């Protein structure tokens, strides 16, 4: 019988052979246990420094059914594994005339394309930026010398924005497609532990190779991936998509297009608005990047500055401001990482966090952000949130000397509203920082809430506002400020054949949820159209 055992608790320091321990607890021969598979592993640190791993595992138990039933009744946390239900795909009666097009090579785009390619649709993927290999060189040039390529940067290019982050795969959604996403990542070179860790991550260094291998599978299955191919317009007739325009001149016939543009394609939002597609303003969050010595975070979370059996610690922090009703929270926390420049437009400073798989820089960073919404935006225009982002990014650019250097400040100086004379912990942001009062690059309401949130967080993590805590600004690209509204079949409300997907469409938030949404939208397309005959 196939079983799942949850809440299996093992001290971190205990070097234990699981099958031996399981056999002892179940009172069965060790050889009767097979097919052991981790479903989840989390850390219980409530009684630090005594830390415990909490496992959920699946395995096969070869015992008579009557004995198995007795074991199920006796052992807490043990149950029969659910029977997996396969999704049956039925071929639609309508066939495509032209191959489907996927716009964008981020997680939503690539997983949509991969889903289509595995079903024989041979999709064409168009990406405005470079391949991940070329993109890495462009990003390095920006970080080292402040030379920005507005089409190939941390936001645009193969792999999407998450490639130059931490490769975090944590998601709050519950969806059958999550396991498909994680297994696909592992197949293409991600560490197998992402299949069961409570907070899985790949790391920028490994994710770059994974992304390249995803591309190679799409191509091997008959798909095509083109870089430096920016979709600059759509041609329609009678409410249906007919062609797409690439680089302002090439016309590609297409009746089914998945639009997976990411959350920073502001030019695309503009021409969709001009085409009268239904767009909605969406709340998001803005704030600053905070950095601490990783040892400080480890001490708070583990009870020791460095644990021999654990990697660098992370944290999750939330705050509800009673005065304004706004929420503040830690976002995109990167243990053992660094703060990076993530601008995609000239004249703006944008920060983000990044770390490799090893998370070994000894510096922890996270965005501390505050929610903003329609009442904060200058007008009621559907693109007002986008302009709100842009205006504060430009103020940060000016504050940094108009050279893509970023304004920065010690946390204690931010709280006292004074300029920082010297940094106890040098900000890791490249191309560099300029000492500045960060209140000047934030809306007043956001700065006030951040002050109160930081003081509360200091009560939860001792030293959070200490002398070695630094802030760099500004963080604005937490999620899309726009939702491209779609119907129950996954299409734009106003344009048949256009399937908005992922973060840029306003229906996802992070690598895993974007990939899941890409698969979902590909399924909608396949439910309507069969491959070219």
Image: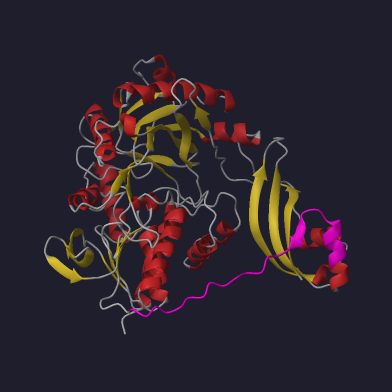
What type of secondary structure mainly makes up the magenta span? loop
For the N terminus, which image quadrant?
bottom right
Question: Which quadrant holds residue 2?
Answer: bottom right
Residue 415 in percent (x, y) is at 42, 18
| Residue 214 seen | no
| Image point (42%, 70%), residue name | 115
Question: Which quadrant holds residue 125?
Answer: bottom left
Please tell me whether residue 78 belongs to the stretch shown in magenta: yes
Going by the picture, which residue comes out furthest to the front? 238
Residue 489 in percent (x, y) is at 38, 63
Q: How is the image coloured?
A: secondary structure
Going by the picture, which residue comes out furthest to the bottom? 533
Residue 400 in percent (x, y) is at 25, 29
Please tell me whether residue 489 belongs to the stretch shown in magenta: no
In the rendered structure, the answer to whether residue 92 lies left or right of residue 130 reads right
Q: How many marks?
A: 0
Question: Which quadrant holds residue 195?
Answer: bottom right
In the rendered structure, the answer to whether residue 354 lies left or right of residue 144 reads right
Up/down of 340 relative to 500, above or below: above
| Image point (28%, 36%), residue name | 389
356 vs 485, nearest the viewer: 485
| Image point (23%, 65%), residue name | 240
Up/down of 253 relative to 181, above or below: below
| Residue 434 seen | yes
Residue 274 in percent (x, y) is at 17, 50
Range covered by the magenta-colored residues: 69-94
Up/down of 20 relative to 446, above or below: below
For the C terminus, which image quadrant?
bottom left
């Amino acid at each position: 019988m196939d079983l799942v055992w949850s809440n299996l608790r093992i001290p971190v320091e205990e070097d234990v052979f699981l099958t031996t321990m399981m056999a002892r607890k179940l009172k069965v021969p060790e050889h009767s246990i097979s097919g052991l598979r981790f479903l989840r592993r989390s850390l219980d640190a409530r009684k630090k420094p005594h830390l415990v791993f909490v496992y959920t595992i699946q395995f096969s138990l070869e015992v008579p059914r009557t004995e198995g039933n007795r074991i199920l009744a006796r052992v807490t946390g043990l149950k029969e594994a659910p029977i997996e239900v396969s999704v049956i795909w039925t071929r639609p009666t309508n066939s495509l005339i032209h191959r489907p097009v996927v716009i964008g090579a981020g997680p939503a785009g690539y997983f949509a394309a991969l889903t289509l390619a595995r079903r024989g649709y041979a999709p064409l993927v168009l990406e405005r930026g470079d391949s991940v290999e070329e993109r890495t060189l462009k990003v390095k040039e920006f970080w080292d010398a402040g030379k920005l390529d507005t089409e190939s940067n941390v936001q645009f290019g193969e792999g999407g924005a998450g490639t130059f982050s931490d490769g975090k795969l944590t998601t709050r959604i519950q969806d059958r497609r999550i396991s498909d996403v994680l297994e696909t990542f592992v197949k293409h070179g991600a560490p197998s532990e992402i299949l069961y860790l409570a907070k899985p991550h790949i790391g920028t260094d490994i994710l770059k190779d994974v992304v390249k291998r995803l591309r190679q599978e799409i191509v091997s299955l008959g798909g095509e991936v083109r870089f430096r191919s920016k979709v600059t317009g759509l041609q329609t007739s009678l409410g249906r998509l007919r062609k797409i325009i690439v680089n302002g001149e090439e016309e590609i016939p297409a009746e089914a297009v998945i639009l997976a543009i990411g959350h920073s394609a502001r030019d695309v939002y503009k021409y969709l608005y001009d085409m009268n597609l239904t767009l909605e303003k969406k709340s998001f969050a803005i704030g600053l990047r905070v950095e601490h010595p990783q040892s400080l975070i480890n001490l708070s979370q583990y009870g020791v500055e460095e644990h021999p059996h654990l990697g660098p610690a992370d944290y999750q922090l939330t705050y509800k401001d009673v005065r304004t009703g706004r929420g503040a929270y830690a976002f995109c926390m990167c243990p053992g990482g660094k703060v990076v420049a993530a601008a995609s437009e000239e004249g703006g400073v944008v920060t983000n966090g990044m770390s490799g798989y090893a998370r070994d820089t000894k510096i922890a960073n996270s965005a501390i952000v505050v929610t903003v919404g329609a009442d904060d935006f200058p007008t009621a225009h559907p693109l007002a949130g986008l302009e709100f982002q842009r205006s504060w990014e430009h103020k940060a650019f000016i504050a940094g000397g108009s050279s893509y250097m970023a304004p920065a400040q010690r946390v204690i100086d931010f709280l006292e509203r004074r300029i920082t004379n010297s940094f106890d912990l040098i900000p890791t942001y490249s191309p560099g920082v300029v000492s500045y009062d960060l209140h000047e690059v934030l809306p007043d309401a956001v700065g006030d809430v951040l002050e109160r949130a930081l003081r509360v967080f200091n009560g939860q993590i001792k030293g959070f506002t200490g002398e070695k805590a630094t802030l760099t600004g500004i963080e604005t690209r937490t999620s899309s400020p726009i939702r491209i509204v779609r119907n129950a079949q996954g299409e734009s409300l106003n344009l048949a054949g256009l399937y908005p997907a992922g973060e840029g469409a306003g229906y996802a938030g992070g690598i895993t949820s974007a990939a899941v949404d890409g698969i979902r939208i590909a399924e909608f397309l396949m439910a309507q159209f069969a491959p070219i005959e």
